[in-house]
Every structure is written in C-alpha cells, then in structure tokens.
Amino acid sequence: MNTRDYHSAMDLLNPTPELEGRIKGQLNLPPRRQAHPRRLAGKVLVAVTAIACTFMAAMAVSPQLRAAVLTFFHLEEVEQVPGPVGEVPEEPEMTQTTIDDLVEAQYIRLPNAGSGYSYGIGTLFQAERADDGSLLDFHYWAAEGDQLVPLETRTTEFSPTWDGVTYTDTVYWCEYEGAISCHCDGTSGYASDYNYNVTSIPGSTDSVILRLSQGSQMDYRQYPVLLDLETGEITDLLSGTGWEKSAPLTDVQWTNDLSAALLYSDHTGWFYCDRAVKTTTALDELTDLEVFSAWFGQDGALILLTRSGPDGDCYDVWTWQPEDGQPKRTFSHLPVYQSRAENPYGFQFFFGGGRGIYVAEDGTVSVLDLVTGGTSIVEDFTLSRQKNVTLIANASGTKVLFASYDSQADGLGISSLGVMDLERGVFTLLDRENYDALQEGSLSWFDEDRIAITAHGKEDYNETYLYLYRF
C-alpha cells in the first residue's frame, strides 16, 4: 500500500456527519476526542468511519479478531534530516514540518553540549550547574507546535533514612498534561556506596517513587518509598507486608494504584506483595510454576514466563489473576530470540499492555496478545536478517517504535523510523536521508506518542540537536 492508495481508501470510508452520528449512537460509542490538526493532517487519519465502527464493535467482543492483522504502510516521501547549521544558539530553538501529511517532525537546536540539556516524560529540561558540578537550578519546557513553552519548576526536599543511611536531597519537578517529570541528581562517582533516584507514577500528580539503594553488583539492594511532592512526607510502602523474606530486593514493579507489587531478588526470586492484606508470597508457591520472569499486565493481572523445551530454550506464557489463584497458559514452546544466532528468530521482547513481538524463521513479524493468546501479523513486511533493528514500546504498550540502521554511518545512522500503532492496527514506516550529516547518539520515546533522537555535530560536538517525531 502506498500513500495514494491509503489516502483514497480513507476518503472512501469517511461518512457524512449525519451518518457518523447515527453509527455512533447505534454502537453506543463515546464522543471522539478532538485531535491536533497538524497531527491528523485533515482527512487522512479519520477516527470514526462506517466500516471502522462496525469493526470496532466486533473487536470489543472478540480478542482474536482484534489481534488479526496490522496493515503495513510505507510512506512515499523521504525525510530530509537537517544538517549542521554551524552556530550554537543561546536558547533552544525549534522548527516543525509535516512529512507526507502523516508524520509531524520537530527539530530542536540546543545550546552547547555542556549546558545540561536532556528530556524526560514529554518535556525538555536543563540542569543548570556550578563549576564544581553542583546543581544550581532546573528548567523545563514543553514542545508544542513550533514553539518551546517554559513550564513552572517546583522543588521538594526529602531526607529519609534506610538501613543506616540518610538520603538528603531535592527533587526538581513539573506537571504537564497530567504527568510528572522529575529529577534528582543522586550520588556522583563511585566514592559512595549508596544512591537514589525518583520515578513518576502513572496517573499521579501528587507523589513519586523514591528508590533508595546501597551496594553494587552481588551486594546491590534497593528499597522503595513514596514521596509526597507537596509536603515532602515519606511513606514506607512495604511496611508490615512481610517483604523481608524476598530481601535483598533488586527490582520492584508496581500496579498503577500501588495496591500490589512484584518483588524480585537475584538471590530469592519472584514474590507477590499484596499491600491491602499485608502479605508477601513467592510466586512459585502461589502459582505452582517455576517462574522465570513476571510483570503486571492490565487490571492487576500478572503475566508469567516459564522455561520449556528440552534445553529450556523456549518460553511458556501464563496469565495469573491474584484473586483466582489458577494460572492460564496462553502460549507454549515459543523459541527464545537469540540476537547472535546465524538465523535469529523467536520472541524479540515483551512489553507493557500484555503484548510481545515474535519474529518467525521467514522474517515475518507478529504481535502476540499474551493475555488472550491472539496473534496479529504485520502484513507485507518481513524483517531482514542482515539489518540491525530496534523495537521499543512506549510506556503504556500501545505503540512500538521500529528503527533500522546504516552500519556504515557515524553514530546510530537511523535509515528508517516507524511506529506500530497497536490500537489502530497500522505500522507506518518512514525512510530517512541525510541522517549521516550529524552523529546520532540515542533513540527512545519522548512521551506516549513522540519518538526522540539526539544528535551532535561531527566537527563541533557543541552543536546538539533533539528531533521529535509523531506518527
């Protein structure tokens, strides 16, 4: 499918406003959300159509139908990546363009590399420092349209004590579009035997998780506490739950409402902590399985992996509801992906929302619904064994970033960039040119919808750039 075909098909599906209203009324669908006009580019991304509404109603009652197919859409227009400008701005500067009416690109030129710029959850930020490296101030911006909008930076001081160490510092944070971006320095270098960091909580704007840690390598251990951003009050999240049987903790995962946690230790394995009833129990005991890995899916359900196959080189996938007590197997004997194998295939990775990527021996790519057992194949797309690629899910697991690389380029050399939109059932791929004019250094999600690429000049490292893409 090319651009012209895609536009024509969407035009044919676009109902009149009167018909759209009748369809929505019959299906009892919620009103559609008004989207950014630059992002939708007019008629191309119509959210509600006569056929699409019927299909949405069918998907609601059939998970297998919902996971049937992803349409592969290769954009005709090629991105011309901006080259070096030759001068360093005093303040961040941004320009915006739209590629093939479908991809919104924001190009941000930053002050020199030593100015402390980076990005968090949907925000650009700068750590302003003294000559000795100490933090003086912190600044946040939002990237909206072709402008950078300054955001209010707030601070919260904390000073909890854990395992004989007192952790004293300040969190610099801001709220933007119902989410918290936050930062604290932690300790620097290897002189200290302790560290700490902060992470936001999905859906929360009043608290963050403060993770305290001590030791390194086999002696590493951590402990989570809740930090109230308004008062600085510390809440011990695991107190009275019997978490000690899982110690020393090396990883902790939470449900969004913090009612339960998955506790993991390199020494003791996986444990399920129910904060409501104050219990901590080994997952092997609760499920009667030898759990290799675990994480939360939706609605507090757990997704579990166990080893299978004669050599333990396959996975079985299970779902487990804590209130039911009986695990259900959704996939059996899935080959484990081996990146260094001569002909690699199998599971690429798992991600939030209860899905995973599977690559078959012939290079075809599928999205697996690990909760229902449904499979969604990407139409007309195969993954070349010769290409170095990256797949990264956004935080909610609704979209997957896809990138392939030019191995001859300096830096990453991202030759193509795309997004698998699992809610819309579309994989959109954009080719890039002139990507080697700068040295691209990192690739990740900027927020739930935008991809971020950082780059710097080859001759002048102080020329730094941040590119954002919304598919």
Image: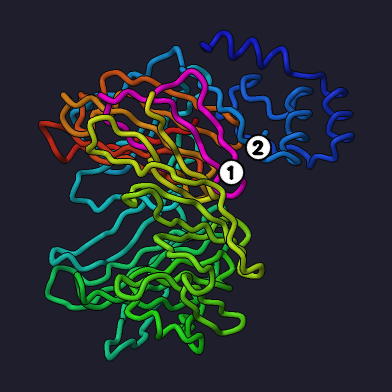
Residues 18 and 171: in front is 18
The answer to whether mark 2 and mark 1 are in CB contact below 8 A is: yes
Residue at image point 86% right, 23% down: 19
- 202 is higher (above) or lower (below) than 156: above
Give x and y (percent) for residue 441.
Answer: 23, 39
| Numbered range of the magenta stretch | 363-392
For label 2, the crowd category at 10 Å Cα-Cα, with few meaning under 14, some 14 to 19 and many 20 or more, is some
In the image, is 469 to the left or to the right of 85?
A: right
Q: Mark 2 or mark 1: which comes first in sequence?
A: 2
Hey, what amino acid is under mark 1? Gly
Q: Is residue 149 visible?
A: no
**Residue identified by numbered label 2:** 64
Picture coordinates of residue 168, whole percent (x, y): 31, 81
Q: Main secondary structure of the magenta part?
A: strand
Q: Quadrant of residue 373?
A: top right
Give the alpha-carbon distance from disc 2 to disc 1, as whole Å: 8 Å
- Amino acid type at mark 2: Gln
Point 73% across, 33% down: residue: 56
Camera-side residue: 243 or 374? 374
SS at circle 2 = helix
User: Can residue 19 be seen from the camera position used here?
Assistant: yes
> Is 385 a magenta residue?
yes
Point out the residue furthest to the front here: 310
User: How far from the left and from the top, in percent, is residue 74?
Assistant: 46, 17
The residue labelled by disc 1 is: 373
